[in-house]
Image (cartoon, grey):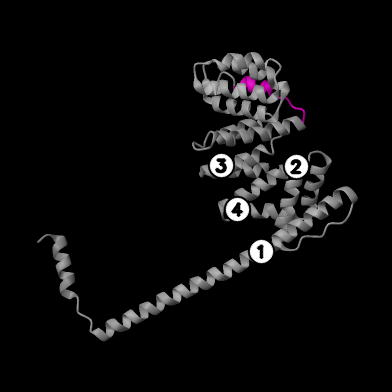
Amino acid sequence: MDATGGDIGLILERIRLLDPQTVRTILIWAILILLSADLLLFLITLVHRVVVDYRDRRYRRAYEKFTDQLIMAMYYGEAIDRPKGSVELEALGDVCIEISRKFKGEEGEFARKIARDYGVVDYYVKKTKSFFLATRVVYYEKLGYLKIFPIKKELEVEIERTEAEWAIARMSYAYSLLIERVEEIDVVLHNLSRCSSVSFKFIEFVWYNIIAIFRERFFELDEYIRAYLISDSEKAIFLRAFIEAVGSYKLLEASELIMKVYEEYRDDTLMRISCVRALGNIGYGGFCQIFEENIKHEDWRVRA
């Protein structure tokens, strides 16, 4: 017999049969323990549901209250209640983010000022120190929407030390909301290039944020695009996403740039499709000629 068989045989020889009364006692205790565990889990689930529902109701009431108060304060100068507790801070913060995203200029800045003055920003910054990565990502994103530029350096360090691709992508999105200089686009593109599974549409959303910021600051992206993206096959996906974002933003002054890309990437079917779609979205004056050229294209995707 081999060593394994000998060991098993030795163990079997040492097993002593238990008397029926002992077996009965063990089974009873096992049943009682399992039943108690089931009851405990049921109670925990019930309490958790009650707490979550209560918190959700509080949040909805607070969100509606702060929405009304913020609008009244914005246009009529009325007072806003100080948020009490984390639920009201979350609600006020979400209202400020919603208004700052929908309204530009004075209204958006007013909402961001309320977030700073009423403790929302301090609460978010504290949450970025959380042990949980998912929590940190969410609050970096919220700080990005509120244009809290001082958090940018800390965010960049967080991105560099993170290995989870989903977190890198979402924090890069947050960083795209905080760009102040053309050179910082490289930081975003470098981090997105680390993510093998990031979607094309997501990259387009990132570019949309960047275009919006540069439009607000009256900066031009043409020079950057020509120098760093055009004629670089490795960055073609970023260029294509930029073209799509330009179309979504309806940036008519980018027509010349799109036409340059269109001519340079004639053999790239996907780039051609993005250029045609963008030119149509922005209302390019010579679009009829482009349309006629592509409606007869050999690739069915271009014709479609």
Q: How many neighbours does mark 3 have within 10 angstroms: few (below 14), some (14-19), or many (20 or more)?
A: many
Real-space CA distance between mark 1 and mark 3, rounded to the nearest whole angstrom: 30 Å
Q: Position of residue 240 (x, y in %)?
A: 58, 26
Q: Earlier in the sequence, mark 2 or mark 3?
A: 2
Q: Secondary structure at mark 1?
A: helix
Quarter of the image with the N terminus in it = bottom left
> At x 64% / y 13%, what residue is drawn?
289
Real-space CA distance between mark 1 and mark 2, rounded to the nearest whole angstrom: 26 Å
- The residue indicated by pointer 4 is 135
Q: Residue furthest right?
A: 76
- The residue indicated by pointer 2 is 102
Q: Nearer the viewer, mark 4 or mark 1?
A: 1
Q: Secondary structure at mark 3?
A: helix
Q: Earlier in the sequence, mark 1 or mark 3?
A: 1
Q: Nearer the viewer, mark 2 or mark 4?
A: 2
Q: Secondary structure at mark 4?
A: helix
Location of residue 219 with respect to 23 vertically, above or below? above
Give the amino acid type for the residue marked by disc 1 in the picture: Arg
Q: Secondary structure at mark 2?
A: helix
Start-end of magenta stretch: 217-229
Real-space CA distance between mark 2 and mark 4, rounded to the nearest whole angstrom: 25 Å
- The residue indicated by pointer 3 is 168
